[in-house]
Image: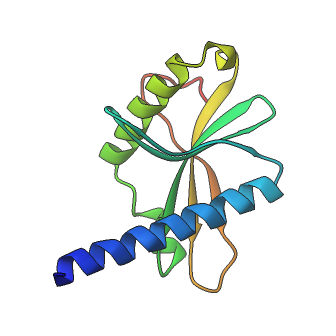
Amino acid sequence: MTDGKITRQKAETRGRRAEQLAALWLRAKGYRILARRVRLPSGEIDLVARRGKIIAFIEVKARQTRRAGETAVSRASWSRINRAAESWMAKRPALASQDWRFDLIIICPRRLPVHLRDQWRPDFAPTRR
């Protein structure tokens, strides 16, 4: 096994654990997890959660510091997540009346998760929350 493959496997394991912790955190805050690790041709979404009339498309980042997590998602990544969110929502007409937003959860060692709501908005859809 190559060093690169081992590194990727460790990163994958760390990411899965971070997503599990984020999902537990959201559930404790009253969210219902609708989907995990959504993979579509248009992009990927770590978590999709609902609370009340809000559907949250959540990117999860495991980083050493909050600041590193806050800067870990590029505008291009948010755009891919948005395309995936649009595709995911298009297949669920029962959710069409829901508002939706893009959140970030940062998982740092020995700290509680940080849930940053409404972290990004597509320029073309300012009415989304």
| Numbered circles on residues, count | 0
Residue 12, picture quadrant: bottom left
Q: Position of residue 46 (x, y in %)?
A: 50, 50
Q: Is residue 128 left or right of residue 12?
A: right
Nearer to me, 75 or 94: 94
Q: Is residue 36 left or right of residue 12?
A: right
Q: Is residue 129 visible?
A: no
Query: Residue reaching furthest front?
Result: 1
Q: Is residue 52 left or right of residue 69?
A: right
Quadrant position of the C terminus in the picture: top right
Nearer to me, 19 or 63: 19
Residue at 59% over, 36% down = 101
Residue at 50% over, 79% down = 65
Quadrant position of the N terminus in the picture: bottom left
Colouring convention used in this rendered image of the protein: rainbow
Q: Position of residue 13 (x, y in %)?
A: 45, 72
Residue at 82% over, 59% down = 28
Nearer to me, 19 or 83: 19
Above or below, 52 relative to 9: above
Nearer to me, 92 or 70: 92
Above or below, 27 relative to 114: above
Q: Is residue 127 visible?
A: yes
Residue 48, picture quadrant: top right
Q: Position of residue 58 (x, y in %)?
A: 56, 48
Above or below, 68 relative to 97: below
Residue 23, picture quadrant: bottom right
Residue at 29% over, 72% down = 8
